[in-house]
Amino acid sequence: MKLTLKIWRQPNPATAGAMHTYELDGVSEDMSFLEMLDVLNEKLNTSGEEPIAFDSDCREGICGMCGLMINGQAHGPEVTTTCQLHMRSFKDGDEITIEPWRADSFPVLKDLCVDRSALDRMVQAGGYISANTGSAPDAHAAPVEKKKADRAFDVATCISCGACVAACPNGSASLFLGAKITHLGELPQGQPERYSRVVGMVGQHDHDGFGGCTNIGECAAACPKEIPLDVISQLNKDLRTAMVKGR
Amino acid sequence: MPVVATPTLVSPPRSTRSTIALKLVMATSGLLFVAYVLAHMYGNLKAFSGQDKFNDYAHHLRELGEPILPYEGFLWIARTVLLVALVAHVVAAVLLTNRNRRARTTRYQVKKNVASSLSSRTMRWGGAALLLFIIWHLVNFSFGKVNVATGETGSAAGDPYTLMVGSFEVWWLTVIYLVAMVALALHLHHGTWSAMQTLGFTNTAASRRRAKQAGWLLAVVVAGGFSLVPLAVLVGIIEK
């Protein structure tokens, strides 16, 4: 198939970027979206033009490294990561607009690559449990109710790709925060630091300039791991409880 | 590279100084308004039982709580609470909106709305429109008592029933009220669900569904109930 690609080009964080248009022919519908970009980059290389920078790592949908805004949707039209999106989701003659995640907390490094270390800083601010090192405890040492274990596991699938922030009109990372808070909050190991965790993570979230949640649901619709909106309710509930506890 | 965000950790954070604390202010003040509009809508329906019953009801509101409260005591307590809630709701909305605008200063060239409802996307402008409407509504029926048909104001505008029927016999005023009720329905539809979510009451798929249904129900019942009176005046069911 033949495609018209409108892609954001920006040489570095300090220089203003702009949309550039590229024509690409001979795209197979079996290619992944990133392979399609690889083909375009080969073509650019041959013609002596700077290839387009974009992030990717595992290309299996599990690492969270890739992430592009494709035709106004984070990770494109399917509920999956950009690497698992295939060209069969598009048709011959399509015009595809590709932009980096847009949030002031995710500054553009180059072209389609953004700096998502703000998500790591949120985890550093409380998204962990403190445990003494030593030999691993027995798996049944801390019993976990099945329902709680399931919920914790479901939300622990968050790969920190940042699609929730990219899709949110407020640039809020509430779905990411909610996933971390719910994951650790459902498990016994997460209880001792439960309320300092939520205050620390929300404080870091606000400090790094993410917006507030307006409960509109664009994040959950964009999440490749289908993390539901109720994790944000859990986040709000834990923050409210922390407030009552005077933290 | 000056544009890259600073890798510093904030310390020490406080729950009360977070965006979620502001959201809690929005939610609690909003739920107070929900309770108020329900009671107000119920009171308006007294118009269907005639001039005397409606005026009695309006007068009784001033005597509510007597003799423990002075004359109009309950009314002034309600007005004070509502005014404080309104200021809190608007201030929190402005602070949060400014924050949200700063969170993305470079806009997308193309951005699709996939899951968000029309009501959720019109909260800010719809809320501003409702604020303007409330100011006019108070001038119309509470502090000013303006009869737009005769130009009379204050006690000259007649008893509550006369002023109400006289107002809704003016077609363009009825249109303003009905448009405001559409804005109210949209605001309640998203606001109810959003308040439940912000307060942390929707931790399961089932409770999330119920909160959304409550939003629909309140939007239809409140905006519908309010609209019945001007519509009844328009078609002549309620008359002087």
Image (cartoon, coloured by chain):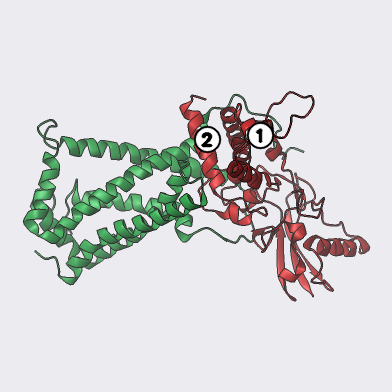
Chain colours: A red, B green
* Residue A1 image point, x, y percent: 79, 75
User: Is residue B47 at least partly visible in the picture?
Assistant: yes
Same chain letter for marks 2 and 1: yes
Give the residue at x 54% y 53%. Answer: A217
Identify the amino acid type marked 1: Gly
For label 1, the residue is A127
Q: Residue under mark 2: which chain is it in?
A: A
Closer to the chain start, of discs 2 and 1, is 1
- Side of A98 where B77 appears, left or right: left
Q: Split into 4 quadrants, where in the image is the C terminus of chain B?
A: bottom left
x and y percentages locating residue B47 in the rendered image = 15, 58
Most foreground residue, A99 or A82: A82
- Give left or right: position of B128 versus A193: left
* Residue A133 percent across, percent down from the top left: 77, 24
Does the rendering let one see residue B158? Answer: no
Q: Is residue A10 left or right of residue A49?
A: left
Tell me how far mark 2 sits from mark 1, CA to CA.
14 Å
Residue B4 falls in image quadrant:
top right
Which picture quadrant has residue A89? Answer: bottom right
Name the element at disc 1.
loop
Q: Residue at 19% of width from left, 55% of height from top? A: B44
Q: Residue at x 39, y 51 (%)?
A: B128
How many numbered discs? Answer: 2
Residue B172 to residue A123: above or below: below
Disc 1: which chain? A
Mark 2 sits on what residue? A238
Instruction: Classify residue A30 by image quadrant.
Output: bottom right
